[in-house]
Image (tube, rainbow, N blue to C red):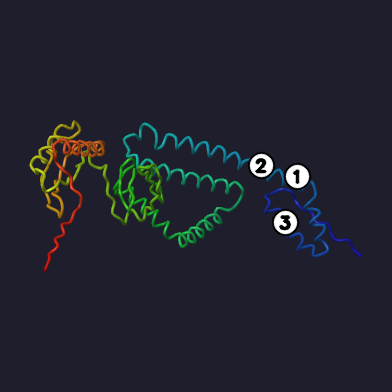
Amino acid sequence: MLSPRPILLSAEGTTEQVTEAVTDAVAEAGAAGYLDAILAWLSPEHLIPLCISIAGKILACLLILVIGNLLIKLLLKFFPNGKKFDKMDRTVRVFLHHLIKIVLNILLIVSIVAIIGVPMASVITVIASAGAAIALALQGSLSNLAGGFMLLLFRPFRIDDFIETQGVSGTVIDVGFFYTTIRTGDNKHIMLPNGGLTNSTVINYSREENRRVDIDFSIAYESDCDKAIKIINDVITAHELVLNDPAHFVRMTEMTDSAVKITARAWCKNSDYWTVKFDIGDKVKASFAQNGISIPYPQMDVHIKDNK
C-alpha cells in the first residue's frame, strides 16, 4: 500500500488563510491525506506562529478597549460638561452626553472587531440586518427615541422643572433617549416614556418666575362676609413673600347650599408658592376663630309637614 502523500503548509498568513490552505490541501490529497493534513496543521511549527498571531490580536484588542474607555471618560468629562458649555441649557447637555457616549462606544466596538480581522463589509451587513430586526421588534421604543428628540427640539420642560403629566407630578431630573425621569415630592423616581410625553398634556409649574396662589374659604351664612374679606386681605397684605404687583384679589365668588365661598388670589415667587399657600391658610383660620367667623359643615334642613 502506498503511504499518503505528505501535505506541506506554510505557517505564514492569517488564521483564515491557514485554514483555507488546509482545506485546499485536503481536497488535493484526497481522503488518504486527511490525517496527514490535520497532523501537519497541528504541528508546533504551524501552531506556534498561529497562537502568537492570535495572542497579539487579543492583546491589541485589550489595549484598545482600555485606552478607548479612558479616552471616552476623559472626553465626556469635558464635553459637554466643561466650563465652555455652561451657557448651554442643562437639558441639552445631558441629552448630548448620552448621545456622545453611545456613539463613542459603538466606534470603539467597531474598531476592536476590525482589529480581530472581521471584514468591515460583513460588520456593516450584520449591523444593518440587526438594525432592521430591532426596528421591527422595538417600534414603541423607536417612538420614544423620536419623542426624546422632539423634547430636545421644543423643550416643553427642562431639568429641575416641576411638571405634571399623565396623572403624576414631580421635578425633572433626567431627560434620556427613551425615558424622562421625574422625582416626586415623596422622593420616588418615575420614568415616563418620551413618546407618551410628546402626545400628552404637560403642565410646567416652573417656566414662569411668578406664580399665583388660589385659595377658597367657606364661611357660614350667619357670619359677616365683609369682615371675613377684610381679615383675608389683612393676612395677605402682611405676608412678606406676597408680591404687590400684580395686586392680590379677595372677593365673594359663590353661595353654595351651606356656605358662602370667598376666593383669594395672591402672587408670589415660584419658589415661595407652598410657603405662601400654607401660611395664608393657617393665619386666616386663626383670625376667623378670634373674630367669630364660623366655618360651616355641610348641612341640610329637613321640614316635616303634619297633614293631620
* Sequence-first disc among 1 and 3: 3
Q: Nearer the viewer, residue 245 or 132?
A: 245
Residue under pointer 1: 48
Spatial CA distance of label 3 from label 2 is 22 Å
The residue tagged 2 is 56
Tell me which residue sits at (14%, 41%) in the image. Answer: 293
Q: Name the foreground residue: 180 vs 83.
A: 180
Viewer-closest of 279 and 267: 279
Q: Residue at x 15, y 57 (%)?
A: 301
- Closer-to-camera residue (35/283): 283
Query: Residue 229 at what x, y percent from top left?
Result: 11, 41
- Identify which amino acid the numbered label 2 is placed on: Gly
Question: Which residue is at a point 68% across and 46% down the rendered structure image?
Answer: 54
The amino acid beneath tag 3 is: Ala
For marks 2 and 1 on the same chain, the one whose residue lies earlier in the sequence? 1
* Of callouts 3 and 2, the N-terminal one: 3
* In this rendering, the label closer to the viewer, 3 or 2: 2
Q: CA distance from mark 2 to mark 1?
A: 12 Å
